[in-house]
Amino acid sequence: MNTNILYIFRYKKSQKDGSYPIVLRIGHRERTTSISTGYSIPKADWDSKRRQVKKSFKGVNSVSRLNHRLMKMRMDALDKIKLLEEKGQLHELTVQQIKKHLTQEKDSSSFFIFTKELIGDFRKVQRFGNAQSYKTVNGVLKKFCKDTKKKDLQFKEITYNFLKDLK
């Protein structure tokens, strides 16, 4: 995996209150981008060697919990990147697309994921006929995408021309 994620302290981006943001810096194929952690602290409270907030920071009840949250954010991001790598999708993505994957809670742009959730919801409320209809449509589209050598179907790809080809 040639993709890495580090915490950086943005010395050049001062906030109005004089603090500086802590961001996750994503490096992928010689390109970088940043994701905000939502935290900013004074320059004096950042330990650049350990890449963590010093115990002298008074902006939170527990500095160790803040450092733990930052570490969890990084580990969650690394886990998502590892999952993309295992699926064989990582090498195809740009750093901006990776950022988009990391910042989205759910991949609502994937038709197959959406319909799978919808089918599950229909089954929970015992609407088995609707669930079966959606399952059938999902199967037809998966077969069509497999024939066209596509692994996933994004909502933005469902265009008039796509539907004409499907017909």
Image (cartoon, rainbow, N blue to C red):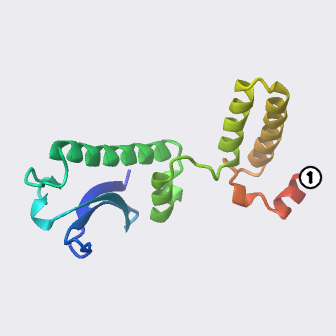
Quadrant in the rendering for residue 3: bottom left
Is 94 drawn above or below residue 16 in the view shown? Answer: above
Is 57 drawn above or below residue 112 in the view shown? Answer: below
Q: Position of residue 138 (x, y in %)?
A: 78, 40
Outermost right residue: 167
Q: Position of residue 149 (x, y in %)?
A: 72, 50
Is 87 drawn above or below residue 32 in the view shown? Answer: above
Q: Position of residue 51 (x, y in %)?
A: 17, 55
Quadrant in the rendering for residue 46: bottom left
**Residue at left 73%, top 59%?**
157
In the picture provided, is 113 more to the left or to the right than 55?
A: right
Closest to the observer: 134 or 33?
134
**Residue at left 85%, top 63%?**
160
Q: Position of residue 81 (x, y in %)?
A: 43, 48
Q: Residues within 10 Å of mark 1 (few under 14, many from 20)?
A: few
Q: Amino acid at mark 1?
A: Lys
